[in-house]
Structures are given as structure tokens and as C-alpha cells.
Image (cartoon, grey):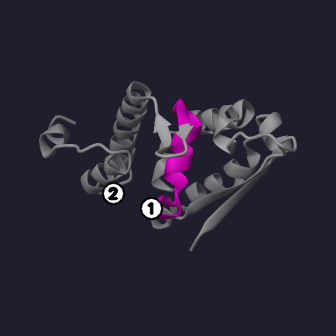
Amino acid sequence: MTITIAINTDSINNLDLSPASEVIEQLLQEGAIASHEQQLQFEINYALEPGDPREISEVPEVRLWFLRLNARYPWLPFLLDWKAGEFARYTAMLVPHQFSAKEGIQYNPEALEIFLMQEIFILSDWLKQQNIPSQSRLKSMAQMLGYELEDAFFAIL
């Protein structure tokens, strides 16, 4: 079951997380967070000027909103619908990048590594708290961003 969070220009410009918080807090209160793995999508309705060539992840106001969201819910990638591209878009909101017509999105490699390792550490601890097996999930997340994590890495976590 897909869960959609709609955010608009006003929410973004006012750093208002309530559209996301209402949905996420409801899941937390129901104790149903684990049953909604990879089901969350964002519908972003942000008004750009006509002819503005930027992708939505290049708009500073949108990126700032997602940075604030990540600060409040650093384990959010667990809920994002990876198959629908939500994790890649979320990453683009948080990691400096450029677009290439030939190669698509090109993340800053060092920033991507830092982001990925931070998410691995956060999610590893959070998944343990939720009694959810983590190693295969975290390996899959890393693979989505082009990284391979060895089993030995998880032994030291």
C-alpha cells in the first residue's frame, strides 16, 4: 500500500513539516512503522517560474525542507519507496550533485559517501531498536548508491 505525502510551495517556504509529520507520527503511534517499509512517496508541488530549467532537487528551498525532515526523521529511508525512485530523489535532496545529459545525476562522491555512512549508522541502530533484521536492507540501500558493504563491516557495528 503506497502512502503519499503531498507537500506544496507554502509548506516548503515555511519549513512546515506538518504534512509529513502527521503521516509519520500516525504510523509511529499505531506501532505500524515496520509494516510500511518502502511504501512512502512524496508528491512535491513547488511552483517554479516559467522557463526555470532546474530539477526540483536543485531548488534550495526544497532541499532545505528535506534537510529539516531528515533531521527530524533520520531513519526515513526505511519508509521510502525505493522501487519508485524515492530513495534516489531523497538522496538528491541531501547530497550535492549535478545533472549530466549523458549520465544522469552525478553526486559529489565524498558527500555521497558521508551521507551513505551516516544513514547506515542511523538505520543500523534504529532497525535494531525495532527488532528488524538490518544487514540485507542496509546492503541493498548501499547498492542503490553504487556501494558494496562487506559482511565484516557489519560485524563491527
Label 1 crowd bin: few (<14), some (14–19), many (20+), radius 10 Å: some
**Quadrant the C terminus occupies:** top left
Residue that mark 2 sits on: 132
Per the model, the C-alpha gap separating discs 1 and 2 is: 8 Å
Residue that mark 1 sits on: 34
Is 126 placed left or right of 74 in the picture? left
Instruction: Look at the image and say whether residue 83 sits in the magenta stretch.
Output: yes
Helix or strand or loop: what does disc 2 sit on? loop
Image-quadrant location for residue 47: top right
Q: Identify residue type, mark 2.
A: Ile
Secondary structure predominantly adopted by residues drawn in magenta: helix
Return the residue nearer the eye: 145 or 139.
Answer: 145
Q: Do labels 1 and 2 touch, CB within 8 Å?
A: yes
Helix or strand or loop: what does disc 1 sit on? helix
Label 2 crowd bin: few (<14), some (14–19), many (20+), radius 10 Å: few
- Above or below, 129 against 72 in this view is below
Give the mark, 1 or 2, whose residue is nearer the N terminus: 1
